[in-house]
Amino acid sequence: MMLTKGLNRGIILIAAALTLSACAGRERDITLRVVQSDQSGPDEFGIIPGKPLQQPDQYTTLPAPNPGGANRTDQNPLGDGVAALGGNPARLNPAGVPRGESALVAYAGRNGVDPNVRTELAQQDEDYRRRKSVFTKFRLKRTDLYNKIYKNETLNAQREMNRYRRAGVPTPTAPPLN
């Protein structure tokens, strides 16, 4: 009698585990930061009303159409805030390399610059995350996987500080151990 009761519990537990694992049959998601909402409606905080339309002084000097670009009636909350505090909103969209960083950029590109480096790195990162996410398909709860996936790729500040100090390099303090 006791053996039958324990066997029935085991069968029920196995059936429950199989039922729950069947719920995880969605397409594999390799994103790292899970910032999805459970709601399917629009984001009411992402909607910014446009500026009022203005009649130009002369219709012959209208700007050329710019599909996908900025419109004169588009809001720019960050630029408006900078202007309200006395700054120059044009500095938010710098053109070229700032004067103070030109020497750094020249030194960094002394051996040549690969124009496709961003696309190559993005592809390598996606491949790496896909390889690391093989066993994350069966998660019951969606979690932030960034630190888990890149754990072996991060530097240990204390260990690096000690290594540099042993080599005689003057170093600032590192964050305290947790």
Image (cartoon, grey):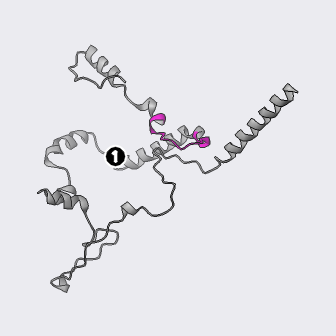
View extreme (right): residue: 1
Depth check, front residue: 64 or 162: 162
Work out whether residue 95 can be spotted.
Answer: no
Q: Residue at x 27, y 19 (%)?
A: 164
Q: Is residue 138 above or below residue 97?
A: above
For this orientation, the residue located farthest to the bottom is: 59
Q: Outermost residue, left direction?
A: 86
Please give left or right for residue 174 compared with residue 85 in the image: right
| Category of crowding for the residue at label 1, using alpha-carbon neighbours closer than 10 angstroms: few (below 14), some (14–19), many (at least 20) | few
Q: Which residues are magenta?
A: 136-148
Q: Which residue is mark 1?
A: 114
Q: Nearer the viewer, residue 1 or 83?
A: 1
Name the residue type under label 1: Asp
* Residue 136 image point, x, y percent: 57, 40
Q: Position of residue 41 (x, y in %)?
A: 48, 63
Q: Secondary structure at mark 1?
A: loop
**Residue lying at 41% horizontally and 49% vertically, measured from the top left:** 119
**Quarter placement of the C terminus:** top left
Q: Is residue 139 magenta?
A: yes
| Rendered location of residue 149, percent (x, y) | 48, 36
**Which residue does the image show at 37% across and 60% down from the upper left?**
45
Image: 141 above or below 152: below
> As drawn, which residue projects farthest toward the top?
166
Quadrant position of residue 133: top right
Decide: is 172 above or below 16. Answer: above
Q: Is residue 143 magenta?
A: yes
Asked if residue 148 can be seen in this view, the reply is yes
- Residue closest to the eye, 78 or 4: 4
